[in-house]
Amino acid sequence: MNYFPDEVIEHIFDFISSHKDRNSISLVSKSWHKIERCSRKRVFIGNCYAINPERLIERFPSLRSLTLKGKPHFADFNLVPHEWGGFVHPWIVALAKARVGLQELRLKRMVVSDESLELLSRSFASFKSLVLVSCEGFTTDGLASVAANCRHLRELDLQENEIEDHRGQWLNCFPESSTALTSLNFSCLKGETNLAALERLVARSPNLESLKVNRAVPLDALTRLMSCAPQLVDLGVGSYENEPDQESFMKLMAAIKKCTELRSLSGFSEVAPLCLSAFYPICQNLTSLNLSYAAEIQGNHLIRFIQFCKRLQRLWILDSIGDKGLEVVASTCKELQELRVFPSDLHDEEDNDTAVTEIGLVAISAGCPKLHSILYFCKQMTNAALITVAKNCPNFIRFRLCILEPNKPDHTTSQSLDEGFGAIVQACKGLRRLSVSGLLTDKVFLYIGMYAEQLEMLSIAFAGDTDKGMLYVLNGCKKMRKLEIRDSPFGNAALLADVDKYRTMRSLWMSSCEVTLGGCKRLARNAPWLNVEIINENENNDLMERNEEDEREKVDRLYLYRTVVGARKDAPPCVTIL
Amino acid sequence: MTYEKVNELNLKDTELRLGLPGTEQAKEEQEVSCVRSNKRQLQSDNEEESTPPTKTQIVGWPPVRSYRKNNNSVSYVKVSMDGAPYLRKIDLKTYKNYPELLKALENMFKFTIGEYSEREGYKGSGVIPTYEDKDGDWMLVGDVPWDMFSSSCKRLRIMKGSDALALDSAL
């Protein structure tokens, strides 16, 4: 390869898009490192504090697409203070200053401001794609700047963000000349939408493939939208509380019939069941269905719809579908690859006989040979069921089981679920992500350490007995990248046993465990290339000034991650970086 | 690994962690009663239904994104009536005001309810409609504006017989 001119090598590298592969290429030799970094277009940064924007730009001057992740995963469950960090602004400032030809920005769990969006919209003339997932800190004014200034915008995808809605005029800000949109998702906006502006925008966007509207788009508007966009592949529907009248319903159904390319359906919050049935004409074409927000549609309606969806590959649903409903899924959806079953009634304490149990899980595993990813919230589980699931589905890549009651044992034997999860990790040799729950001892971690060779992400809650549990995992799982633990009795011995292990991991989260301030301080001293963050929302926060005895004080929340740029400067008072 | 109490302080008080259901700490939370000026507290002496500490009291559990928690509005509430053998479920969204709701309840459970007055509650029939709100407090149906009621009501209980009479005289 060294006999080829650089341009040829670069051309060959163009075919390699996987981040892992490109990272490997850059390690081969100095010349390959240089060619690779100068030609690299897409960069993925899993922790925005692992590096800073200046060093990023220095290494990859031809950057076109950047993905950044901010807050740790447990921030989704209110375990991270609001003001913790993850600000995108310094990144946009640096990229703008260096005149990087940025075209695509994807952010997850970051804080985005209107100022950032405004700067973004004015700094990158070829900007095409903005994807924001679980972000916060901005308003529809920021969206208005993006709409108005990004002349070549193709994709605006807002997923589950907290956006302050200043009432719908941002859609008007797309200039009449804007006709390049391929994807528009504003389903998370809570306020009113300018329907006329939306309809005009959709009508002049012939390449629009994905449209996800918010609750404020009523049925008749949806009908008009679909009529002028029959090319839609992916549709997110708004909110229709009342049963539509016959005429509206027929019009909607007629518009839907024309959407022969439609493959993915979502939305349906606060929707009358009849509206779901308007989609019967195209349901056999669907490959992706997300009804996990459709709390108003009861099990029997869901079942009736799903039994026609023979081509489904991805299904997100509420547990109101019940075990019976999952049996229907198992016999209908033979192409199913990913299933997520969310809890519907989080406040209900009494026995809810429509929730799902181990029966539904076993049925799915038996009926769906292509299943590789599952997220399953249920009220009970057994070892026997998990062993059966493992035998039926050795191809799991992601297996996340959440038994709603912490520490709940196998309900038929009253034993721990160690054997069940053990069977899963032993059978599923390609398992990359695992979440465990229920009553679990150190033994399950022995199994995980022994068998889960490809495991990259592990979530533990209310599990284990001693430090040995955590040690089994740290010593055994060579490919571990993200470990997050809450309410488990793991302490300093496990934390400090092998400090170098954290060089190979992106991050470790431990909350309500047994690690002490002294242990964390020792870790920080032994591993200066780590940021060891203590998150503590109590008032008296000067952790560095505490005396000897307080070293034994347990740390409420610990978040550590490798970094090449040292302690961050934007930490709020409740975060101490040791 | 030994954990010693530092300076004889019980650091449990400063821990953010909430206990699991059934532990001492959880019981303490249960006993805290909120006294609010607009609430007419209904605490009968033989209150059998002491709500056990729920899983929703553990911070961040179950692990469902707050976005999802906030957007899954379930407007169905369970309705129980003292002496009736089964529970019913109703969708609060289908009613626009108290008279509509009460009429529906009357039809459902075949009873008639007395006149409501803010000062005296439901007089005369020995039937008192109560509800449990978001905070776990039991309130009299009708005390707060309809919108506030429909968004905070978690379940309904129609009290009858001796419990109702006891309340009647207490109010």
Image: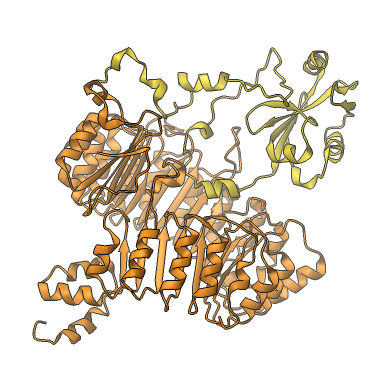
Q: Position of residue A226 (x, y in %)?
A: 66, 75
Left/right placement of residue A362 relative to residue B83 reads left
Q: Residue furthest front?
A: A97
Left/right placement of residue A72 relative to residue A411 reads left
Q: Quadrant of residue B97?
A: top right
Q: Position of residue A124 (x, y in %)?
A: 41, 74
Q: Position of residue A280 (x, y in %)?
A: 66, 68
Q: Quadrant of residue A526?
A: top left
Chain A appears in which tint?
orange
Colouring rule applied to residues = by chain
Above or below, comparing residue A84 to residue B162 in the picture:
below
Above or below, comparing residue B164 to residue A281 in the picture:
above
Answer yes or no: is residue A66 visible.
Answer: yes
Above or below, comparing residue A360 to residue B7 in the picture:
below
Q: Residue at x 28, y 76 (%)?
A: A62
Give the total number of marks visible in the rendering.
0
Q: Position of residue B45 (x, y in %)?
A: 69, 12
Chain B appears in which tint?
yellow
Q: Residue at x 42, y 78 (%)?
A: A125
Q: Residue at x 48, y 26 (%)?
A: B21
Name the quarter where the N terminus of chain A is drawn: bottom left
Q: Residue at x 49, y 72 (%)?
A: A155
Q: Quadrant of residue A30?
A: bottom left
Name the quarter where the C terminus of chain A is drawn: top left
Q: Closer to the camera, B137 or A435?
A: B137
Above or below, comparing residue A549 to residue A302 in the picture:
above
Answer yes or no: is residue A256 visible.
Answer: no
